[in-house]
Image (cartoon, rainbow, N blue to C red):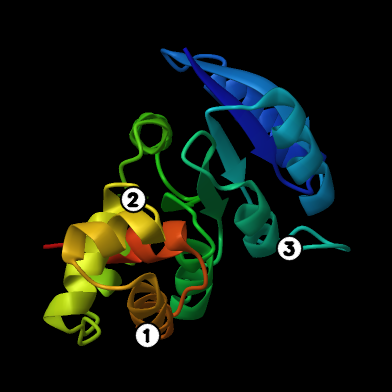
Amino acid sequence: MIRVLLCDDHAVVRAGLLALLGSAPGIEVVGEAGSGEEAVATAAKLKPDVVLMDLQLGPGIDGVEATRRIASPGVRVLVLTTYDTDADVTRAIGAGATGYLLKAERPEELFAAIHAAAEGRTALSAPVARRAASAPAPALTDRERDILGQLARGLGNREIARALFISEATVKTHLGRIYTKLGVDTRAGAVAVAKEQRLLP
């Protein structure tokens, strides 16, 4: 059973999602949050498998910052929003979101995306995926691609340095360049964008 936490600042939306997911096979809603701060605190307490995260959450931190604080290998964040601008998508994926879904999707698409996110697979709405596919991929060097590949395997800086026969300082330098090119500031964000843009070796 996939344990899901809902985060949306509209109670009516949360109620609708709760009713919808109640009929979804293999999915259980374990909590709700009406703000970014509440989502962060509730996720830390309940340890859900997937957090369904809206981007615009009223006063306080937005969905991107909440995603940055929550996303981890154990807790995946799936953005569910009405906003699909390139900037919103890039910020969310960069913050560590595993997927990006639009609220206009059919229920079956949402269910499938939750299952994909729980398994660590990227889930994108069709319009978002089309734009991502047509966007030019950032130019990474062979070494940067090598390091991205090691990141995707979950290795730390020391392990990457050992695997590639380079110093930890060199790894950090390459990571800084990778983050800049991909528009992210976390390891999880770099891996998510790399998967989305098929940059992994």
175 or 92: nearer the eye? Answer: 175
The mark found on residue 177 in the picture is 1
Q: Amino acid at mark 2?
A: Leu
Q: Amino acid at mark 3?
A: Asp
Front-lying residue, 85 or 143: 143
Sequence-first disc among 3 and 2: 3
Circle 2: element type? loop
**Percent from the top left, x then y, of residue 109?**
35, 37
Which residue is found at the position 34% from the left and 32% from the top?
Answer: 119
Q: From the viewer's perspective, is the residue at label 3 or at label 2 nearer?
A: 2
Q: Which mark is residue 25?
A: none
Q: Which structural element holds mark 3? A: loop
Label 1 secondary element: helix
Residue that carries the numbered disc 2 in the rendered image: 155
Q: Quadrant of residue 113?
A: top left
Q: Are marks 1 and 3 in contact (CB under 8 Å)?
A: no
Query: From what the image shows, is residue 105 above or below residue 29?
Result: below
CB atoms at circles 3 and 2 under 8 Å apart? no
